[in-house]
């Protein structure tokens, strides 16, 4: 392989975990660089289902080193739950799982603040947050009032910072949001004194570790969470998450230089989904959307919410190619479309009667975008058994090639034809 970043090209849930699992086999180190426990990465291996929120999903592959980088907002309670589950399943984590001392902690008052802020918004302004405290934790980081994992090394320092934040949050939540604040500082500190003992063996200067790994020519794999259009700058603001989700964030979120990256793989779902609120030009609110949701099991891995489903939108994915500098597509969930009579691809939008083929940056323009479609015949066949690209039905290949053709003829790394590791067609390896 080569040092590779994996990002979602749509609104998340593109099936990144399966492709990361595939790439993990040729990687030495897997790094998470942004987001937090709002992500839910599901991997199915040897018939077992694993859902990760904090620990990089590469951990289930023996001997790989996994790193949670400084750009992540770190939910220590969730992390230790996953560590305990992994240990109970016989997975060794000690000596191969590390957390950056610079990552900011998500604390119980962040989760409360997330819910309180959302509950005070009028319906049309609600973002549909996962409620995991992500936005408030990143807000504190930028406001320079956050508490970092490394602060746990010095208990007095940690308790001082915690008590200051706790009382600020109590004032904010009870006065500005007018929401009940029933957290108990002593109980949380008590829990964190136990968390600290369990967590500190995992905490290191991960940037230094990565620098040494690069010098030793180890292969690094950067595991993005969410997707391009949930990016705080480039996404469908304000209906986005609170981190940069695009490829550039892999460098700032892990502390490596940009010249260390060789490839950027964009995960592309064969149709489009979105969970939470915000514009979605190709959304299907009819029976076809329902079919995609039920056949594709389109329910959030973190919240269980039904995902909104729609046709493939090439305007979006073209933009994702541009802002991530993609070098390959990994196409996922094409099998979900097996039984459709006809399939549509959005080639461009119409806004105020004008043809628009670049993704509009403003929310109000996007709200007015009408998708313009090309219709193709469905292949009406089960493709799960195909192991070579050329063995796919001609109509499936025609759909994939049209999709690529609309997106700068991006080369394909793989086509995934089902959730299992075996259901992966390799096309152009890295
Ligand atoms: P937050 O990141 O929990 O604040 O949520 C902000 C928006 O991002 C909401 O619309 C969420 O549904 C969406 N979101 C956050 N994480 C994920 C993810 O891992 N997959 C898909 N959508 C996500």
Image (cartoon, rainbow, N blue to C red):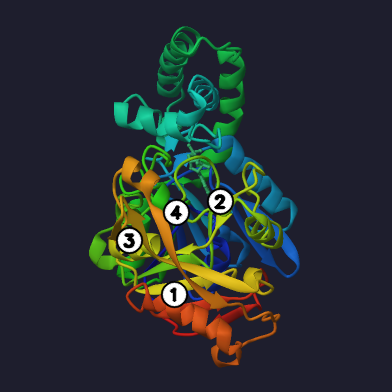
Q: Secondary structure at mark 4?
A: loop
CA separation in Å, label 3 and label 1: 14 Å
One can see residue 58 in this view: no
* In contact (CB < 8 Å): disc 4 and disc 2: no
Residue lying furthest bottom: 390
* In contact (CB < 8 Å): disc 1 and disc 2: no
* Towards the viewer: 356 or 241: 356
Residue lying furthest front: 353
* Towards the viewer: 72 or 337: 337
Is residue 344 shown left or right of residue 157? right
Label 4 lies in ligand 1 vicinity (Cβ under 8 Å): yes
**Of tags 1 and 4, which is closer to the observer?**
1
Q: Secondary structure at mark 2?
A: loop
One can see residue 169 in this view: yes
For disc 3, the marked residue is 319
For disc 1, the marked residue is 403
Judge whether 247 appears above or below 149 on screen: below
CA separation in Å, label 2 and label 3: 29 Å
CA separation in Å, label 1 and label 4: 19 Å
For disc 4, the marked residue is 227
Residue 275 point in image, percent of width and height: 55, 46
For disc 2, the marked residue is 55
Q: Secondary structure at mark 3?
A: helix
* In contact (CB < 8 Å): disc 3 and disc 1: no
Name which of mark 4 and mark 3 comes first in the sequence.
4
CA separation in Å, label 4 and label 3: 12 Å
Callout 3: 10 Å neighbours few (<14), some, many (20+)?
A: many
């Amino acid at each position: 392989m080569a040092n590779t970043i994996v990002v979602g090209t749509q609104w998340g849930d593109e099936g990144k975990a399966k492709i990361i699992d595939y790439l993990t086999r040729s990687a030495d180190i897997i790094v998470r660089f942004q987001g937090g426990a709002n992500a839910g990465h599901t991997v199915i291996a040897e018939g077992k289902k694993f859902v990760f929120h904090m620990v990089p999903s590469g951990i289930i592959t023996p001997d790989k080193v996994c790193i949670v980088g400084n750009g992540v907002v770190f939910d220590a309670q969730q992390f230790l739950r996953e560590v305990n589950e992994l240990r109970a399943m016989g997975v060794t984590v000690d000596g191969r799982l590390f957390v950056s001392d610079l990552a900011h902690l998500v604390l119980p008052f962040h989760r409360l603040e997330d819910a309180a802020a959302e509950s005070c918004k009028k319906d049309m302004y609600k973002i549909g947050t996962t409620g995991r405290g992500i936005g408030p934790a990143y807000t504190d980081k930028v406001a320079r009032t956050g508490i970092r994992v490394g602060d746990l090394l010095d208990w007095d320092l940690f308790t001082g910072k915690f008590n200051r934040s706790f009382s600020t949050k109590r004032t904010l939540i009870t006065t500005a949001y007018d929401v009940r604040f029933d957290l108990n500082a002593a109980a949380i500190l008590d829990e964190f004194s136990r968390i600290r003992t369990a967590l500190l063996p995992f905490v290191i200067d991960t940037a230094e570790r990565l620098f040494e790994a690069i010098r030793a020519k180890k292969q690094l794999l950067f595991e993005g969470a969410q997707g391009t259009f949930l990016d705080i700058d480039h996404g469908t603001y304000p209906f986005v998450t609170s981190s940069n989700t695009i490829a550039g964030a892999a460098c700032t979120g892990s502390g490596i230089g940009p010249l260390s990256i060789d490839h950027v793989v964009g995960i592309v779902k064969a149709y489009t989904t979105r969970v939470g609120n915000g514009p979605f030009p190709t959304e299907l609110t009819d029976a076809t959307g329902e079919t995609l949701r039920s056949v594709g099991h389109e329910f959030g891995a973190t919240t269980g919410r039904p995902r909104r489903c729609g046709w493939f939108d090439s305007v979006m994915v073209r933009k994702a190619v541009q802002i991530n500098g993609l070098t390959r597509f990994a196409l996922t969930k094409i099998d979900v479309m097996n039984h459709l009579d006809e399939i549509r691809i959005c080639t461009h939008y119409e806004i105020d009667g004008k043809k628009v083929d670049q993704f509009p940056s403003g929310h109000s323009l996007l709200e007015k975008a009408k998708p313009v479609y090309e219709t193709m015949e469905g292949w009406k066949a089960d493709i799960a058994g195909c192991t070579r690209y050329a063995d796919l039905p001609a109509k499936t290949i025609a759909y994939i090639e049209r999709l690529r053709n609309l997106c700068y003829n991006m080369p394909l790394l793989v086509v995934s034809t089902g959730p299992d590791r075996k259901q992966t067609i390799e096309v152009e390896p890295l």
